[in-house]
Amino acid sequence: MSSEPTVGPLVDAAQIPPWLRGLTGNVDAVAQSVLNRGGDRARWATMFNRNRRAAAVLVLFAGSWDADPQRPGGLPSDAEVLLTERAPTLRQHSGQVAFPGGGADPGDDYPVGTALREATEETGLDAAGVHVVANLPSFPVPVSSFDVTPVLGYWREPSEVRVVDEGETARVARVNVREMLAPENRFQVRRSVLGGRVYQGPAFFVDGLLVWGFTGGLIAAISEVAGWDVPWDTDDVRPLDETIERAGSRQQSGFSAVHPPGPAVSDPAVSDPAVPDSLPSDSSADAGGGR
């Protein structure tokens, strides 16, 4: 397994859908977008990466090959992204929405092989129909002790997907990207404890799924870099735990394990950590069996 995966496009631009080329041609801007949002804490996290375990997630987009000239970044109306909802019974990140993925296993062709294997195990997809186009820069997730490489794929031949193991996954969804990015479905969530700055970051509520944390932050950065963004109310900031409850979500924020409970505090200056605790952890690291 290579410890230093290639970052950037893995194929010629002609083999990448036009509406993804703005992203694959500037993958470093994704990391910069996340770091800018996370401020100094995010930059510190990227510096302290000793004893981290390699992991990969599959960021898989489906949709028409041709760009829509009437939409920002050419995003077609049928563009979709593959997401999973973790089982509510897991010990870590229960009920949270994530990209399929997990820790690297011996013998994996990391990170691409890891991402495809994990996605197949979690969703039952046929990896033969996935055209891997790029690796994004890796992101450390301190609480989970992972260093995560997002693998970007185009689903040229979409296959049926489903929940393979109900003990790990509650739902597998193909989410329309335009709907996710619609202004009415975008906001930010905040978690403050005893006046301290804990977390603030992008969130989406679409198709019954509340998407935030690592997944929400990465989707927001990808959209920004790809040029898909449409104007939305960035001042719409909602308390995380209250938002989870109102969404009828079964997920847990994950902060209770590392922060004592306390009243939410309004703090407009809170920034989004680049690496919030919301990456799915794999079964060998988590006895709960989550990815």
Image: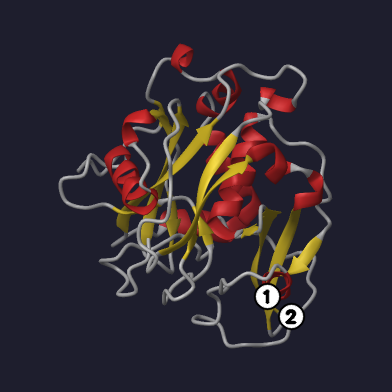
**Category of crowding for the residue at label 2, using alpha-carbon neighbours closer than 10 angstroms: few (below 14), some (14–19), many (at least 20):** some
Cβ atoms at labels 1 and 2 below 8 Å apart: yes
SS for callout 1: helix
Q: Where residue 70 appears, x then y in whole percent? A: 77, 20
- Residue 33 appearing in the image: no
Q: Which residue is mark 1?
A: 241
- Numbered tag placed on residue 120 in the rendering: none
Name the residue: 32% across, 30% down. Answer: 128
SS for callout 2: loop
Q: Which residue is mark 2?
A: 264
Which of the marked residues, 1 or 2, is nearer the chain's N terminus?
Answer: 1
**Category of crowding for the residue at label 1, using alpha-carbon neighbours closer than 10 angstroms: few (below 14), some (14–19), many (at least 20):** some
Which quarter of the figure has residue 112? top left
Name the residue: 58% across, 22% down. Answer: 64
What residue type is disc 2 on?
A: Ala
In the rendered structure, the answer to whether residue 47 lies left or right of residue 186 reads left
In the rendered structure, the answer to whether residue 236 lies left or right of residue 280 reads right
Q: Is residue 240 above or below residue 14?
A: below
Q: Where residue 34 appears, x then y in whole percent? A: 59, 48
Looking at this view, is 27 or 256 the one in front?
256
What residue type is disc 1 on?
A: Asp
Count all numbered tags in the image, as a single digit.
Answer: 2
Identify the residue at the far left of this view. Answer: 107
In the rendered structure, the answer to whether residue 161 lies left or right of residue 20 reads left
Q: Where residue 99 appears, x then y in whole percent? A: 47, 50
Quadrant, the N terminus: top left
Which quarter of the figure has residue 48? bottom left
Name the residue: 82% across, 58% down. Answer: 236
Q: Where residue 32 appears, x then y in whole percent? A: 57, 41
Q: Is residue 15 above or below residue 83?
A: above
Looking at this view, is 127 or 75 the one in front?
127
Q: CA distance from mark 1 to mark 2?
A: 9 Å
